[in-house]
Amino acid sequence: MNEQAKRGETGTRERCTGRSASTEQGHGSAGVSGSASAAGKPRMRTADRQQVVDPKTIDQLIEPDHPARAVWAYVEGLDLSYLYDRIGSREYTPGRPAIDPRVLVALWLYAIFFGVTSARALARLCRYHDAFKWIAGGILVNYHTLADFRVDHLDFLEDLFKQSVEVLRRQGLVDLDRIAEDGMRTRASAGAPSFRRRETLERLLAEAEARLQNLEQQLAAARAAAGTAEATSQADAAVAEPTQASVEVIQAVTTPEPVAQQGVASEEKDTAQPAAACEACPAPQSQTSEAEPASSDEKEASNAQEAARLRHAKERVERIEQALQRMPEMEAKKTEDQGEARVSTTDPEATVMRMADGGFRPAYNLEFATTCNRKVIVGVNVETTGSDHGQLPPMLDQIEASFKVRPKQALVDDNFVSLKDIATTQNSGCKVFAPVKKPKKDGVDRYQPKPTDSAQVKEWRARMGTPEAKAIYKLRPETAEWINAQVHNHGLIQLLVLGTRKVKAVALWFATALNMMRAFSLLPHPNSS
């Protein structure tokens, strides 16, 4: 080892141990502990949890340019009169004040922006995360309130989604002439074992109905027993109240006579009166009873638990009935070699679909229509089938009904349209840009019209063979697939709600949140010059 390497090693050892090489050489191995004790105790920075933290207002929790402020400013510009008109708590009337709907809307939009989809996780963030605490503004929000608000107002969510598009349309930033549509199969909340055959569903329905009937009888008996116990306690209380005669006797005993009339005889009489008074009065009740009556809080908790048990039993019966109602639809899709049809008892509207990874799982098909120029979502739909076939015409009708404009060009993949849909769509004034399937026979030009084609289909075939149409179609993946990726990256990996209606509510929340983010990037910043 050369001299420079030795000096480097010595310096490293000195920094690690806090001792110099000369000290080690002077005292030897026996003097190492002596030199450490001579230097005193080690100096450390220890935790001091009694320090006073600088007091802050809620507004000082986040920076002036924090994204939460942008979300709040965006929500302040929305029309939420639909929600304000439905608040039951009013001035000069009883009732607990409601949470400002603007706070709940901002919380959910920022939660999606933050990648949070669970109501329980959002409730925890409102307590511990500065940005969510700032949006809540000191309001304690329960997770149940957040979960209900997310899915309860579908009409409002559709209007909120329209507002997110109109904000950009008023600025001339959204062009509905060209849109791209694609489906996104999203994992449902139902599990694979919840899918049952018809015979099993009928047996489970009988068991659920019997359980519900038994539970109703138990609750009725418990209420009757509680009413009898309450009537008995009221009767005992009435008996325990002193009568008018006993009250007069007690008053006569406890009222002192004038001092001038008191003598030996009167003192003897007074000593005998308390015994008579005790005989006339009822015996006092013991301070501790054998069975303490339940407090009002305990009764309310017990009633809430009973109501929850009854509600869950009714919902179980309703879900199984709904599964049996959907069974004919699923049986019609099955062939003999595919086995018996099955429907979920957890979420009867969920369907087993082929996912992007090739596996089969319960899912919903979320359809998004997006503008190609600014990547703004302008249409949302939810389907219970794994195929996108036939979904283009309903989406175009939805866009026209919402914004009074029908797109002139629609970019979709080959799974969306049939020749009939192409003819119908193009007759309505919207040109379809979809790839022409490769013929089964070799040497056949796919772009050449066939004798059986209608005029609209012939025009579509010839147009898709041109370089201009192929260049336009290349916009589809960078638009539709990009939106699907954004939805996935912001947390919509698996649905946490049941039923098509609630699933559509979640999809509308995500569409509105993504449009809000596009507005942040397209609209000028308020602080910009």
Image: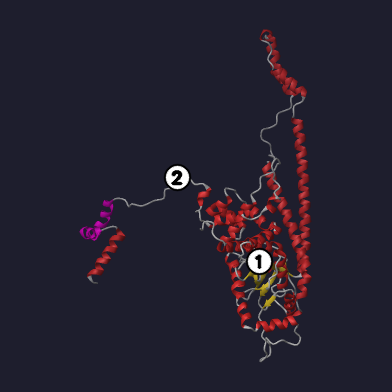
* SS at mark 2 in the image: loop
Is residue 153 shown in magenta?
A: no
Q: Is residue 340 above or below residue 20?
A: below
Residue 363's spot in the image, x, y percent? 67, 69
Secondary structure mainly formed by the magenta segment:
helix
Q: Amino acid at mark 1?
A: Val
On-image quarter of the N terminus: bottom left
354 lies left or right of 526: right
Q: Provide the residue designation for mark 1.
A: 378
Q: Is residue 397 visible?
A: yes
Q: Is residue 182 visible?
A: no
Is residue 34 shown in magenta?
A: yes
Determine the image quadrant of residue 232: top right
Residue 233's spot in the image, x, y percent? 75, 37
Residue 105's spot in the image, x, y percent? 63, 55
Boundaries of the magenta span: 20-39
Given residues 323 and 404, the one toward you in this image is 404
Q: Residue at x 26, y 69 (%)?
A: 5
Task: Name the residue furthest bottom.
Answer: 443
Q: Amino acid at mark 2?
A: Val
Given residues 125 and 201, the one toward you in this image is 125
Given residues 165 and 418, the one toward you in this image is 165
Task: Name the residue furthest left.
Answer: 26
Is tag 2's residue or tag 1's residue first in the polypeptide sequence? 2
Q: Give the crowd class for mark 2: few <14, some 14-19, many >=20 residues within 10 Å.
A: few
Residue 221's spot in the image, x, y percent? 78, 48
Q: Provide the residue designation for mark 2.
A: 52
Q: Is residue 243 above or below residue 358?
A: above
Labels 2 and 1 touching (C-beta < 8 A): no
